[in-house]
Each structure stands twice: as C-alpha cells, then as structure tokens.
Amino acid sequence: MSAATNFDFLLISVVISPQALLFTIKQNFNSQNNASKMSLQACCVKGFEWDGTPERKAVPFPTASNQAYVTGSNSDAVVMLITDVFGWDFINNRLLADHFAREANVTVYMPDFSGTLPIVLTAPRSFNGESLSKDILKMDMQDWAKHGLDIMAFVSKHTREIREPEIFACAKKLRAEYKKLGAIGYCYGGWAVCRLGAKGNNLVDCISMGHPSLLVKEDLDGVAVPIQILAPEIDAAYTEELKEHTWKTLQKNRVAFAYEHFPGVEHSCFTRGDPKKTGEQEAMVRGKSAAVAWFQQWLPPA
C-alpha cells in the first residue's frame, strides 16, 4: 500500500513530551460563532518583519484584487499559501513562499485576498541568513485600537463566508493547471486549508496549517486529505481543546497526519517570531523545514 496514494493509512509524526499529550481543557466556547469571534487574539497582530528581497513579483489571479505573488517554476506541483492577517505583500510571507519554492521544488501561489493589516512591526532576528530590520514598534491590542485598528471589525468584514468562495476559486484554477496541488495556511489561513481538504471537494492533495485561527471542530471533522499541523505549545487561538479534538478526530477518520508540537513557543512563531523568546528562531526554521518535507512527501515529482 502506497502512503502517497492511499489515505486509508495513518501517519503520525510527533516530537512531543508525554506531559504535553495530557491536554487540559482551559476554554469552553459555547458555539461555533463564538469560537470564530474569539479566535483572533492579540498574538495574531504582533510580530517582527524580516529583512530580505522576495524573488518574484505579482501576477494576475482570480481574487477580488486580481493578483497573487508567485515564486518557483515547477510545472507539475504547486502550493497555495493562504496567509495570516498580515497578507500577501508582507515580506515575511513572501520570503517564506520563496523558501518553499526553492527547497520543496514547487511553484507557490500566494493570492491577495485583500483586507490586510498595516505593517509597522519589526525587530532584529535572523532566519536562514535573512536578518530582520531594526526595532520600530511592538504593539498590543490596546495599541492597535489607539491606531484605529479594530480586530473584531476586521473579522466581520472578512468572515469565512465572505472569503471562502474566493479561496475555492483560486484552488480550482490551480487544480486545473497542475497535476499536484497542496495548500498551507497560517493563522487566518488555517481554517481555509481545512475547508479545501474537506471530503468531496477534490481540490488538494495535501494540506498544512500553522497556528490556525478561526478554526472550529467541524473543520477538522471534514478533513479527508493528508494534513500537517504545526502547533506551538502556547496558543490562545488553537486551543488545547481543539488540539485534543485534532488528535482524536483524525485518528478516528483514518486520515494521514503529522502533528508537530513546538514546546515553549507561541502563536505566530512561524511567520513573526520573537528572537528574545527562547526557541522561537529554532521553531521558525523547524516549522519551515517540516512543511518542506511534507510537500516533498505528498507532492512528489511525476
């Protein structure tokens, strides 16, 4: 039986302590709607900007803004990257897309789903030789409010219901043009890749998500393609309840999955990590490398 072609086999790849498996239920959301409203936290809008030069430029694509960042030259395998709320033109996201394209030998499309946040957060750090620019500002939720950014207003303008048709349209276009299609989503993009990988959609061959937000149990219940989960230990959006549900549901549904636990680090560490917090730079590199290996496994050369 081939692991790459038969989903009726279970793959669990875990780097996790026994204590971390004893999940404690700390949050109890009363409804799916309430869960969605609470899933964008302060950690979703804090972080650091890396220094570097993206390798490619924008091209026309079927989004509301009619554009996407594209990198890589593989004509058979493609990955759609659905970003956090910092969006498609945030340099960190573009540099990450470049790494995926080079190291996994795939073409990467990062669509502009619009409605992104102003970028004013930077601090020194390095990622595979790319250094961050100087300290400018690090804001919490109150600071964002003072600058006129209302996170809940942002969520209401860019609900799942509003964005999902656009996301599906992009995936359908890529599905028609490439032999293999994967999807990866960070924060806001986490729920979206689960929807793309849902039973009956037949859109993607594999998915990966890092510190997802706006995710609900029903998203996990529907996943039917191999899924990778990049999970920081400390995450107010991807709660311990959701983590436990992930384990139980994917095993019950016999879905191939790799759960990567990142002890001691917080939500956003894969795209906007803090070098002053022990282990975050290492988590950033490890998270990138894990995603590369995932794509190499499930989107192999024809």
Image: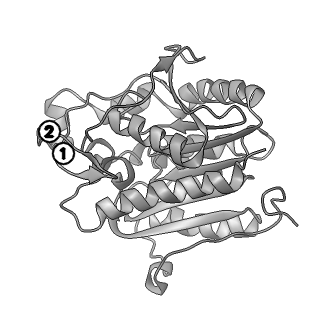
The answer to whether the residue labelled 1 contacts the one labelled 2, judged by CB atoms less than 8 Å apart, is yes
| Quarter that holds the C terminus | top right
Amino acid at pointer 1: Asp
The circle drawn on residue 178 is: none
Question: Is 119 rendered above or below residue 19?
Answer: above
Q: Residue 8: percent from the left, percent from the top?
A: 83, 64
Instruction: Using residue 273 as the reference point, say whether residue 4 is left or right of it.
Output: right
Q: Residue 157: percent from the left, percent from the top?
A: 43, 25
Instruction: Using residue 189 as the reference point, say whether residue 275 is left or right of it.
Output: left
The circle drawn on residue 140 is: 1
Instruction: Using residue 54 as the reference point, say whether residue 47 is left or right of it.
Output: left
Amino acid at pointer 2: Asp
Q: Which residue is mark 2?
A: 143
Query: Closer to the camera, 206 or 191?
Result: 206
Query: Closer to the camera, 189 or 269?
Result: 269
The quadrant in which residue 117 appears is top left
Question: Is 27 rendered above or below residue 51?
Answer: below
Q: Secondary structure at mark 2?
A: helix
Instruction: Using residue 178 as the reference point, say whether residue 247 is left or right of it.
Output: left
Q: Is residue 130 visible?
A: yes
Q: Residue 95: percent from the left, percent from the top?
A: 39, 38
Residue occupying image coordinates x 24% and y 29%: 149
| Quarter that holds the N terminus | bottom right
Name the image colouring: one colour
Q: Residue 135: percent from the left, percent from the top?
A: 11, 43
Residue occupying image coordinates x 47% and y 69%: 261
Q: Secondary structure at mark 1?
A: loop
